Amino acid sequence: MNSHQTPSVPWQPHMSGDPAPYPSAAGGPAPYRLASAAGGPVPYPTRPAAPAASKPPAIGLPLLAVLGLALLAVPRVILHDLHLVNEETFVNLLLVFVPLIVWIAVVLRARVKRPFTTLLAVGGVYGVFLAVTHQLLWNINFEGTPLELSGNLAGTDSFLQELVFRASVGVSSLVTGLVVGAVAGLVALGLSKLTRRS
């Protein structure tokens, strides 16, 4: 007898409660399943787990999209501080409202779950850009315009007065950005509800 003869592999009947057997050539389940040489059943192959779905950003849009939307409103701030556009002109109206329309359109197009929160975040970033722009163009914007505090702070050192004015402008810029974002968010929220109903 050949000592290197491969041992026969026993077959075991499929018992109730076992996993489903391998299919037979005819397409139906085979009545037996292959057993290993040690006597235990050969484990069935398992399918790889499906990759977990990526979660959407907490603010509804990617960070780069939020930054890009906020930057759309910055040109109007630059032109205003450089005294290149007047507030009562049609160009100024376009620079004010076109970015907001784009904000709302993007949020509706992306079908974000919380449009108010998303645009509030965009408005907050816009407020930061607004404050930074005002600080960078401060000397040009207020050139030839004396800034003096009144009341108990009157007569304070000019450097300290400028710091107070700069701080107040920075805070008001952040508040302005948040208010603009909140208004745009409310409009987007109302429009999203109307589109879902229709």
Image (cartoon, helix red, strand yellow):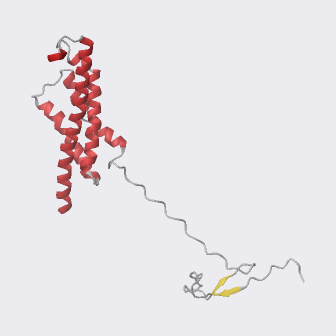
Residue 176, quarter of picture = top left
How many numbered marks are there?
0
143 relative to 34, above or below:
above
Residue 24 drawn above or below residue 142: below
Q: Position of residue 26 (x, y in %)?
A: 57, 87
Residue 3: % across, % down? 88, 79
Q: Is residue 160 left or right of residue 43?
A: left
In the rendered structure, the answer to whether residue 194 lies left or right of residue 44 reads left
Q: Residue 105 or 162: which is nearer the viewer?
A: 162
Q: Residue at x 10, y 29 (%)?
A: 89
Give the residue drawn at x 29%, y 31%. Answer: 129
Q: Quadrant of the C terminus?
A: bottom left
Q: Quadrant of residue 35?
A: bottom right
Q: Nearer the viewer, residue 4 or 191?
A: 191
Q: Position of residue 60 (x, y in %)?
A: 32, 50
Look at the picture and state if 166 lies above or below 5. Answer: above
Residue 86: x and y in percent read 13, 25
Which quadrant of the rendered structure holds the N terminus?
bottom right
Residue nearer the viewer, 63 or 182:
182
Residue 126's place in the image compared with 17, above or below, is: above
Residue 171, can we see it? Answer: yes
Q: Residue furthest left?
A: 88
Q: Quadrant of residue 74?
A: top left
Residue that lies at the very extreme toward the front in this rendered image? 152
Q: Is residue 149 visible?
A: no
- Which residue is found at the position 18% from the left and 48% from the top? 186
Residue at image coords 19%, 10%: 155
Q: For this rendering, which residue is in front, 98 or 26?
A: 98
